[in-house]
Amino acid sequence: IGGSSKSDSSGVSNSGESSKESSRCSTPVLDADRTDRLRDKMKRRIESGDHWFSLEFFPPRTASGAVNLISRFDRMGSGGPLFIDVTWHPAGDPGSDKETSSMMIASTAVNYCGLESVLHLTCCNQTKEKITAHLNKAKRLGLKNIMALRGDPIGEDWVEEDGGFNYATDLVKHIRCEFDDYFDICVAGYPTGHPEAESYDNDLRHLKEKVDAGAHFIVTQLFFRAETFLRFVKNCRAIGITCPILPGIFPIQGYHSLRQLVKLSKLEVPEEIMQVIEPIKDNDAAIRSYGIQQAVEMCKVLLASGEVPGLHFYTLNREVATIEVLRQLGLWAEDPRRPLPWAVSAHPKRKVEDVRPIFWASRPKSYIYRTQDWDDFPNGRWGNSSSPAFGELTDYYLFYLKSKSPKEALLQMWGEELMNEGSVYEVFTNYITGQTNPSGHKVMCLPWNDDPLAPETNLLKDELEKVNRRGILTINSQPNINGKPSSDPIVGWGPAGGYVFQKAYLEFFTSSENVTALLQVLKKYEPRVNYHIVNVQGKNITNAHEMQPNAVTWGIFPGREIIQPTVVDPVSFMYWKDEAFALWIEQWAKLYEDESPSRMIIQYIHDNYFLVNLVDNDFPLDSCLWQVIEDMFATDQITVT
């Protein structure tokens, strides 16, 4: 935040990027926002009078901090920010491939969390060539918005860089010169004037130069009184700055963080605020409560003024205070309805994508990672299933694929010591039921799903509990749905006014003995039930067409073709199989010592169990899959006796 400033402008020019349309395109893109530039989204929201919010984060210092920040993106992204931005710290190798770099955090937010993201870029300690290289890398990673800043000096005073830039205006001009209109550019504004400016009026003239050089919008430094910002906007408009100007909002969350921020920003806290905070400076909860109310009251005045289209929040990588402010303002729009049943990547080349195999439903970041090198994404149908080549997933410790829980927590959930296969069944069952395990801990995740159960899965909770107790270790499932409104809070997705449909689906690991019985049972359920059964060696048993996907989710919406966003595809299932089996070892077995009984139990399951998926094609009827499992157990009993 310190020396950053941000600026917003609603240019209407079209993107200079021409994207090759998919040869498989047959269905209109569901959500216009997926193809728009950030400036276009702002323009549309301004014209409709619909207020928005955006969020600022800074790169963490540690790998575990990066994992935590990505999970915070997922949580805070559910409230509907128009964009997030990620700060640039020259001392932290911000343009590198390190998991703690600004570049990687912003790239992950776009590609794996589906968030429109703005990457800060500063002139500090950088040559023109280095800046160009960073911008090329950002473009390659799918980033299309830059906050162009001079940046804070590393020492006390600004030091000129040979072959570099000394002003944000020069950086904006350089981006425009080298990349034409590819990037939407934000610049910083200072409601009380930049601390190093000759005067307030002089700083306003510099801001206009930045906008005239090609910036699209402005985000301001923080301030503490609404009238400070409104006076600033009035003065900006008076000298011909017409682009959107977003106020930078800082909910006070603690005494020391406030002092630090004020020191970095070279701002003065108004006396009336200090009089409240000083007596309670050691009571963080009281300060946070005051900070929330102070921010809410200020934001209400700003929004009521008619001059403020959106609010930009300095989160300090925390969520409680910002979310509470947004909730009180009515801006936190946690709409359970999704554009599609899976998380949409914000990478521009994936903008037509609207069909995926269901297997990665609980590991969407892994799917995006494994398809990152595709040039063409399916739209309207899966297409020729033999053509996709999924990238290998050999590094399970990429920070955006890693479990949010540390090793100690995973051992508490999954067992410090496993006694037998039944211990594993118990872990799966406790995950489904939400009950605590024998050591008193709740199982909040599994290797195949790093999140608590989805609301949709709760519809199947009783049946899932029964089968998991008996060694049907479920990793993915969905209920049958026959024409629920697209606005349904549990299963709804897509535009309003539509209807959604699903075939019942069940995916699980189970023993070879169960599979032998299951194959006998399945004969009497054909063709109603399609199945794929495979072991780690690749032994594959199926009654499905070897190349033909089976649509298991689809939607019908006003004025559109049928959308089928989720399929069971035979070819991609074999790629998923490798990942699904490997997770037993990479994320579970490796928690234990080599040759330990616990590790040997997981290794045995990995080596001997089968991965099964079942689809009940008769979606208007009650699912028969639970009866299939019951019949399997009955047949198993007969075989044993």
Image (cartoon, grey):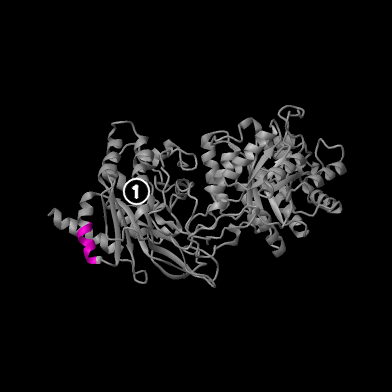
The C terminus lies in quadrant: bottom left
Please give the range of residues in magenta.
518-524
Q: Position of residue 266 (x, y in %)?
A: 77, 36
Within the magenta stretch, is there residue 519?
yes
Circle 1 residue:
577
Front residue of 306/413: it is 306
**Is 11 rendered above or below residue 426?**
below
Q: Residue at x 76, y 55 (%)?
A: 302
Front residue of 304/60: it is 60
Front residue of 268/56: it is 56
Q: Give the main secondary structure, helix, strand or loop, of the magenta stretch.
A: helix
Q: Is residue 115 visible?
A: yes
Q: Position of residue 158 (x, y in %)?
A: 76, 29
Report helix, strand or loop for mark 1: helix
Within the magenta stretch, is there residue 413?
no
Q: For the residue marked with disc 1, what is the amino acid?
A: Lys
Please give left or right for residue 387 compared with residue 613 in the image: right
Q: Residue 594's quadrant in the figure? A: top left
Specify few, some or many for label 1: CA neighbours under 10 Å numbering under 14, 14-19, or 20 or more: many
**Is 592 rendered above or below residue 110?**
above
Q: Residue at x 68, y 60 (%)?
A: 45
The N terminus lies in quadrant: top right
Q: Position of residue 202 (x, y in %)?
A: 86, 42
Number of marks drawn: 1
Q: Residue at x 53, y 49 (%)?
A: 113
Q: Is residue 290 visible?
A: no
Q: Residue 524's quadrant in the figure? A: bottom left
Q: Position of residue 450 (x, y in %)?
A: 44, 47
Front residue of 560/3: it is 560
